[in-house]
Image (spheres, rainbow, N blue to C red):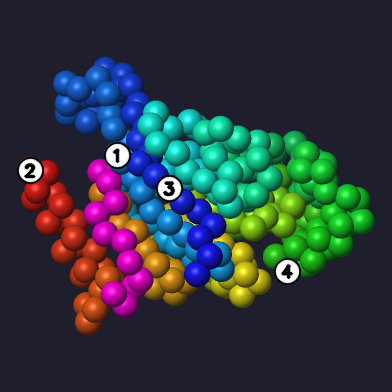
Amino acid sequence: MEEILRVEHLKKTFLLSKKQQKIEKTAEKKKIAVNDLSFTAYRGEIFGLLGPNGAGKTTTLRMLATLIRPDEGDATVDGISVVKNPAGVRKKIGFLTSELKLEDYFTPSYLYDFFSGLHGVPNDVRDARKKFLFEKFGIDRFAEVKVANLSTGMKQKTSLAISLVHDPEIIIFDEPTNGLDVLTARVVTDFILDLKREGKTVIVSTHIFDLVGKICDRVGVLVNGKMVACDSLSALCGSETLEDRFFEIYRAEMGDAE
């Protein structure tokens, strides 16, 4: 298998405000969000990061997407360093997260064209790809409706289409079905599988066991910023369910932490 993503010893620490210290019930002024994290992903696979809220999933993906810089370590995307050449990495990836909001005033059509321009997509390629993606996600009927007037599901599908304007080789999804109704979640899930069939690599974070079981080839379990298990679903779980195996790993790790 061809390696397309290599993550080596990533670490990210955040300062805690006094209010956050109180919430966290700690006197520590810093929180280690990601701690010496390493893993690889291969071309044409779906790799899942599974963990509870606060495990470090979003921080990890934001580092891979070059939105924040790691304190230590590095990651390479198709041989390009996120630390040394973040602009080069952005040309290779698409990134979707619910934390990034579309501007309410603009329409899906305008935003798609705008981001296509940022990526230098030729107009003819832009128009053909927009037609395909908008029809696939049912955005075409709402192409000239302002984002403020779209449903939550339609906003998510618009964000998904925009993240793919430049036809990236690696697509990074942070909780892609979070907050979606079952129909929209199914559309997103099916499309992730379509991307794999096209030979794309998908990195997805989630806390939803069912989603991991449906789409992931391999999964890494994150607890307190550390990768505590990483393997194929069959090797990781054996005869157990993913949920049972996860809680077994989680309890063992938290017991060690205590």
The quadrant the C terminus occupies is top left
Residue where numbered disc 2 is placed: 258
- Callouts 2 and 4 close, C-beta under 8 Å: no
Residue 234 figure quarter = bottom left
- Tag 4: amino acid: Lys
At x 58%, y 44%, the residue is 80
Compare marks 2 and 3 and give the one earlier in the sequence: 3
Residue 35 in percent (x, y) is at 29, 39
Residue 41 in percent (x, y) is at 47, 59
State the CA–CA distance, disc 2 to disc 3. Answer: 28 Å
Q: Residues within 10 Å of mark 1 (few under 14, many from 20)?
A: many
Residue 170 figure quarter = bottom right
- Callouts 2 and 3 close, C-beta under 8 Å: no
Q: Is residue 178 visible?
A: no
Residue where numbered disc 3 is placed: 7
At x 56%, y 68%, the residue is 44
Compare marks 2 and 1 and give the one earlier in the sequence: 1
Residue where numbered disc 4 is placed: 136
First to last magenta residue range: 224-235
Residue 194 figure quarter = bottom right
Q: Is residue 11 visible?
A: yes
At x 25%, y 74%, the residue is 237
